[in-house]
Each structure stands twice: as C-alpha cells, then as structure tokens.
Amino acid sequence: MAAIVVLAAVGYSVLALNRFRTWRSATYDLVIFDQAVRSYAQGHLPVAIVKGVHNGFGPDFSVLGDHVSPLLVLLAPLYLVYDDPRTLLVAQAVLLAGAVVPLWRFTRRELGVTAAYGVAAAYALSWPVAGAVGFDFHEVAFAPLLFAVLFDQLSAYRHGGGRRRYVALACAALLLVKEDMGLALAGVGVCLLLPHRGRSRERGDVLLGLGCLLGGPAYTVLATQVIIPMFGGRSDYYWSYDHFGPTVPAVLWHVLSQPGDALYTFFNPATKTSTMLMLLAVAGLTPLVSPYLAVTLPLIAERMLSESPGWWGTGAHYNAFVVVPLLCAGVDGAARIARHRRMRRFGAVWTAVVVIVAVVALPGSAFGELSRPSYWRWSDDMRAMEHAAGQVPDGALVETASSLGPHLSGRAQVLLWDRTPRWAPWVVADIARPQFPFCGLDDQRARVDLLQGSGYRAVFRERDFVVLHNPDAVPRLTAPPAPPCGGS
C-alpha cells in the first residue's frame, strides 16, 4: 500500500510540475488559488485579485465569496516554506495519493486484502484523478481523501471497530471542502438510516442520519445564500438551472411535477450518459446495487441537470469529487453480490475488472501524456513565453495571457488579460494563439492596437508574444466584465 501511495504522489507531481515547466498551466484557475493561499499565509482573507477583477467583484475579492472552501487555509504554512504555485501542485498530488490509505482500509474490511490492493491501484490510475492532476489545482484535492476517510470510518463503525463520532467528524470535515458537499451528506444520511447487515440500528444512528440528510442540504443553502454573499459574492453566480426555475424550490417542484422532463434532461445530450457510464465503469457497475450510490447521485445530478456543458463531460476536475464514493459503492455492491452462495468468486472477478478498466483508460487520460515524447520537449513558443515573462519586473501589476500568469504569480500582481482593458502598467499579450476569454485572434490583436494607440510601448516581441509597458497608466480595476462572446 505504501508503495502505491508513494508512486502515485510522485507520478502526480511529475505530471503537474511538467505541465507547469512546459507552460501548459493556466491563470484560471492556478493563479486564483495561488493568490488566495498566499493571502492566507500573510494572515489575510484569501484574496485573489485575478478572480475579483476579471469577474467584476473588485480587487479585494475573497475566494470565500466564490466557493466556501476554508480547508485551503491548511496549505498556507507550506507557502512560508516555498512561496510558489508549484507548492499547490505538489500538495494536491500528495493529498490525492493520500486517499489510497483509507480507501485500502475500507476495501480490505469489506472485500478482502487482494481487492484492497486492486481498488487502490484502480483509484490511483483512474481517469477522474488524472483529470484533476491535469487541470492544475482545485479544492477537489481534499475531496477524495476526506470521502475515503468518511467511508472507512463508516465501515469501521458498522463492523463494530469504530465510533460514531468519528463518522460525524468526517462528515463535518467534508463540508469544508466546498459548499455543495452538503448534498453528498444527504446521501450519507440515507445510508445511515438504512439497516445494515449484522448490526441493529441505534438511536444515535438515526439522529446522525437525520442530521446528515437534513443538515447537509441546509448547510449548502446557508453557504450559497448567506456565506458567499457575506464575502462579496453572489448567491446566484453559478446558478445554471433556469430550465427548471429561478430558485431551488421552483426546481424541486418542477422535478416532482414533471419527472419525465427531469429524467430526459438528466440523460441528454448523449455526453451526459457517456460520462455517467464511464464513471460506473470505473467502479465495475456494481454501485448500482449499493445504497452508497446515494452519496454520489446528488453531486452527479447537480451537474447533469445544469445548463453548463462544461460540467457534463469527462474533462477537468469535476469527476474527481465522486470517484471515491463510486469506488466505495462499487466495493459494497461487489461484496453484496459475493455473499450469494453461487457468487463467492465475484469479488476477485470484479477487482480484476476495475483494474483493467483503469489501465485501458490510461492512454486517453492526462496520465497518458507521460508516455508521449512531445509532452517533455520545449518548443520555440515556450522559450518565447519565458523571455516575455522575464521582461516584467518583480512586484509589477501585469495583465497577462493565461498561460504566462502562473509563472509570474509568485513575484508580481497578476491580472488576466481579458476583454475589458484594465490599464495595468504592464501587459503580456499573445496575438497568434487563441487566449481565454477573447472571442478570437482578431479580438486579441485589436486589444494590442488599442493599447499601443493609448500610450503603451512594445518593449518586447517574439513569436507574436508582445510585452507592452506604459509607466503612466492608471489601473481601472473595478470596470465590469465584458459580455460573453456573441453577447450584447
């Protein structure tokens, strides 16, 4: 088990650090978290000027007004040792690898030692984890570990070797990852309220189950409607369910009164169905016979019922939130099937399947990049980015194209070069490669022309990376964001 943890942590670190080394990391979202954790380390609220300015919240915006993820403060001491975005990449690698330990313990208890090693390996190689590692850093780093701890404590308690209060503490810790973890706790509550083989349900189980079932969603409502606005955010900023209604009660009524419409939305377009099948494949399909699936369903429904296509697919970090609950549900489902007299070898077959699925998916995941020579090579574009970033002095306020931001964030005040002029003294532009959030190369070139016509001087140009400087520029950091491309 220790070897799996170490190899996973090293492999994740190598992948993430090489992405950084080869200028594949992005300002959104690595710089956001870098600025927030650095702010924590300096004894302040987690202010991310890049997030506040780009999204129209102002330069003093705390990321607690974006997502309620106070666990990020635990990373602040690391910045006292090494103040750099790469600290977050390594920390995430260690946290993701650390989930192997409680996941192994849970599986050993439920399905045996051999299965424990197989599930640990399947998790470590899984494409949802690869998606998180390959998408820089996010608060998801804490989710697999804390979900694995929760299921390990729940299993230990149900088998008579643990205590209920440890289950409650694990639930409470999970709420600190992100505001929507309260939805997952509702599923934990359902599991606690259901009878368990070989153990009678006690009054404390019912109270904890009801507490999770009711308190989890209540916390999510409190976080989105009170805590986020209290820190300068908007309660509806990530609302993406207008098809069902403008509020949570309206959505619930729509789902209850028109279940066919909700079911159709849940599975369409086909991208959603494909993602869910791939997630079930990670756990060998057996979550379908486990009550632990209830922990995952609210988080999946949150994404699949939304109108945001970016939440539906297999890319980015979103699936790493659910990979451990799904694997634990898969273990539980496999154990239930294996208890039938004619299915006693099912556990071994299931373990082989989940390992094979993980291995087969490797080439198409971010982990597959490690075997491609092009992934390790430096290009002329990368050298030009290094030269361009070197033109910006330490401590400067700079608007920068997305791929350069992470390399400047440790020594400068980074803003995202976006569709609203911020008039920072320094601007690092790219007029040859499409940059988020511009609408196209013509848009990017027009911005450079605007700046040069407004007193900025090009002090560097290489492979169409342009560094502009105007020592007399007056920053305007409260201008509202530009409308979406194609918007009015």
Image: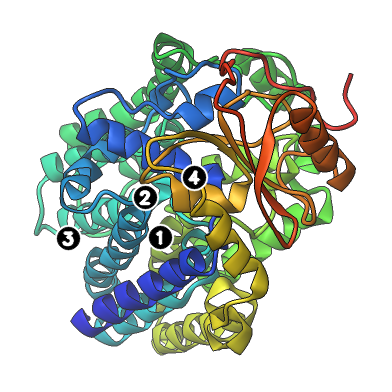
Find residue 424 and report its image quarter: top right
Residue at point 34%, 64% (across, down): 93
N-term-proximal mark, 3 vs 4:
3
Q: Which residue is mark 3?
A: 159
Marks 2/4: CA distance? 37 Å
Of discs 1 and 4, which sits in the foreground? Answer: 4
- Residue closer to the observer: 484 or 349: 484
Q: Position of residue 212 (x, y in %)?
A: 33, 31
Helix, strand or loop at label 3? It is loop
Is the C-beta separation of discs 1 and 2 under 8 Å? Answer: yes
N-term-proximal mark, 2 vs 3:
2
Q: Which quarter of the image is occupied by the N terminus?
A: bottom left
Left or right: residue 185 versus residue 4 is right
Left or right: residue 251 versus residue 258 is left
Q: Which residue is mark 4?
A: 392
Q: What label sits on residue 143 in the rendered view? A: 2
Q: What label sits on residue 416 in the rendered view? A: none
Of discs 3 and 4, which sits in the foreground? Answer: 4
Q: Position of residue 404 (x, y in %)?
A: 56, 52
- Residue closer to the observer: 127 or 206: 127
Q: Which residue is mark 1?
A: 324
Q: Position of residue 288 (x, y in %)?
A: 55, 61
Left or right: residue 57 versus residue 242 is left
Of discs 2 and 4, which sits in the foreground? Answer: 4
